[in-house]
Each structure stands twice: as structure tokens, then as C-alpha cells.
Image: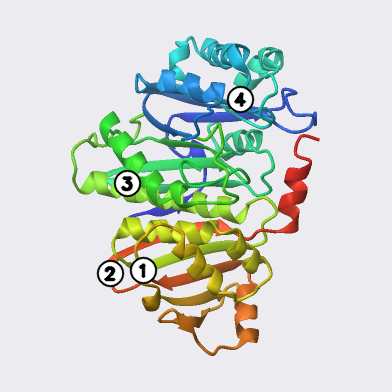
Amino acid sequence: MNKIKEISGGVCAPKGFRAGGICCGIKASSKKRDLALIYSEKACTAAAMFTANRVKAASVLVSQEHLSGGVLRAVIANSGNANACTGEAGLTAARRMAELAADLFALSPAQVAVASTGVIGVPLPIAAVEHSIEALGNSLRGDEAGHTAALEAIMTTDIRKKDGAVEIEIAGKIVHIGGMVKGSGMIHPNMATMLCFITTDAAISREALDSCLRRVVARSFNRLTVDGDTSTNDTVIIMANGEAANAPIAAAGADRELFEQALESLCVKLTRAMARDGEGATKLVTVTVSGAQDEKSAETLAKSVASSSLVKAACFGADANWGRILCAMGYSGAEFNPSEVDVSFASAETGGSCEEIAVCRGGASLPFSEGDAKRILSREEIDIRVKAGNGSGSATAWGCDLTYDYVKINGDYRS
């Protein structure tokens, strides 16, 4: 089999996981799912990363407590209310959510992680969760329908569903990794409001799982930007239940490397999907920097370009304003020689070959066709390719264009 194979099923693709989602009344619309549950039949080795924002939602604080033990059985999540900046009442509500989910399966609340997303500063209507917890438990399924229901229940301003699953072979055993993510606005590198839940049936030590997750997040979610705002609720949780019965992954080696590659493949797919679904976005923008002093410098340069409001606006207008790219590189803080920078734009028609047009060489303008550049920049996926010098460092960051609709969405988000 191929080393990494894409499959269907999302978080229910790995053996032993079930998921579900219902409408419990947190959202204003009575027809939209807003409460999700992911459950493992066996105890899971677990690892997580949370927002770097000093203002943290109650769900983040409670989940950090519960993850300290490194073992989970379930994740309960709601949309429509962030349960952030809600004081002691918010912490009480988050802990109550964990208790309610734990009671369904006779678990300790410490084996349940909690996540929330939605409006900040509004008390969470915990009574709605209490009244619906039995229905939530009954909604669990071990197939793609269960995965989809849970995914729909964590979406807010998301327009597109963002999920995936991969399959690999480790020591003769088939291992699956599945994931879902929500995130459309309030997304910026540094644990880019995103929630991501990943399941795997791999047998893997906590140390190895935590190490793999941190390296993968650094190369995927932390290289994503939509609008420059880091949320109070950002959460990435991975649970591994060992149902694949592979030889446990612990020490560095080929098995651990393959697992990390598969996890990175999945997380990059989810990252790209979030960038494409940025609030009001019409285009996915991929920025790749090569020739930098090292990978860290390349990452800093790529993220600065992807984060630039002027670059994002130029992508929206299909304007080949490459000077904005050099400007964004210049204030990034990374070392490079402006006179060595080359810039090109590229994109591919659906099912067609990739077109590329060079617009800058050696930090200076090149003659190019404005018409050809506009055609390339008018497509749904745009690549900005930057050669920063002759170094060995390279990195990719992902973002989107900045549109009128972004302001419209966020101008009346609460209403």
C-alpha cells in the first residue's frame, strides 16, 4: 500500500471511536446542531495544545486540567457560545459539561475534555446542555454520519466542512488517523476561533504523541492566518486508543517518523481548508519562501507575507502588487538581503497545469504581462513564491484574501 492513503470517515475512521451531534438550543436557530461528542470505547493516550492568548476560555482552562493526566475517553464541545470571559460561572459550566458527558459512560470527569466556540462574554446556557445530554449520547455513531453530525455541531461562521482521514501501515498493522476542524475567522498563527479534534487507533506513548503533535502544529496550524486575531478558545486535541494493535510507538525511528508524516499530512489538509474558508474569503493563498537563512527565518517571512492586509487585499483584487510582499518581508524581523529576493505568482486552472509568472528578480521589477498576472491571481488558489536568497531554509504559510464580506460578517457577528 502507499505510505499515506487518504480515506473517508473522519474521526470515526479509527477503530473504537464514535461521534455525534445534536441541536440543544445554544444557537439562536433551532435547526442548527450546536452540541457535539466524540467518544472512545477504550481509554486513550491524549495530547493537546491550546491558545497562546492570555485570555483563555473556561473550556480551555478545564481541559488543560484534565489533560494533565494524559488520558481521555471523550470530548464534548458546543458552538454558539465561547464561554470565555464568563468568570467563575463559566468555569462551573465547563466543569458541568464534562460531568454530564462522563455520567453517560460512568467515567471520571477528568477523562473528558471540553471545548466551546462562539460569542465571547455571554454566559453559557448550561441548562440547555443538561436537558439534551441523553439525546447527545443517543446520537453517537461509529460511521461517517456520526462524524459529520459532530462536525456540523462545532461550526459557527464556517461555510465549508473541514475534515479528513488517512491510513498507514506500521509493523504490519493498519493504523488510521482522522480529524475535524472548525475555524473561519479569528485565526492567526500561534495556535490559530479554531477547534480541532483528532483520533487515531495507533498504539503510541504519551511522550511520542505529544512530541509529534507539537512538531506538526508548528508546521501546519501555526503557519495559518486569516485575520491576525488569535482566539481565546483555540484547542487541538489528539486521542490514541491503541485499537490498531501495532507495536507501541515510543522511541524515535521509522514507525514514529511515518506516524508523524501522516499526522502532518492530515493537519496540513485541515490548515489549507481553514484558509480557504476564511470569513468572506474567495481565495486560498499559499506563501512559500525558499533560500532563507534557515527554516525559522523562512517561516517568519512566509507568515509575515500571508498576514499582510495589503497583500491579502491585492490578492482579492487580482493586483500583482509585488512591492507589498517585499514590504511585509522587511518588517518581519527576519534577516535577508532585499537585493537577492525573487518573487513569482502561480496558480492552476481546475484540472489544468500550473501557470507561473515572475514579477521581481533581485529585489527589482521585471517586465511582465499585467493581463497574464491578473488571470493567474483571479483563480481560487494562488501561490506566492519567494526566493529570499541562497540559504537552505524553506517554509510554507497559508492564508486567504481580504474581502468586503469579512467586514460585513464581523460587523454584525452578535446579531
Q: Which kind of residue does numbered mark 4 sit on?
A: Ala
> Label 1, on which residue?
290
Q: Residues within 10 Å of mark 2 (few under 14, many from 20)?
A: some
Number of marks = 4
Q: Residue at the spot x=69%, y=42% of the render?
A: 157
Whether residue 404 sits left or right of residue 116 in the image: it is: right
Question: Is residue 363 visible to us here?
Answer: yes
Hey, which quadrant is residue 35 in on the image? top right
Q: Earlier in the sequence, mark 3 or mark 4?
A: 4
> Label 3, on which residue?
260
* Local secondary structure at mark 1: strand
Up/down of 282 relative to 75, above or below: below
Q: Which kind of residue does numbered mark 3 sit on?
A: Glu
**What is the distance, in whole Å, between disc 3 and disc 2 at their CAs?**
26 Å
> Label 4, on which residue?
84
Question: Is residue 397 visible to us here?
Answer: no
Residue 391's tag is: 2
Q: Nearer the viewer, residue 359 or 17?
A: 359
Q: Nearer the viewer, residue 164 or 208?
A: 208
| Nearer mark to the viewer, of 1 and 3 | 1
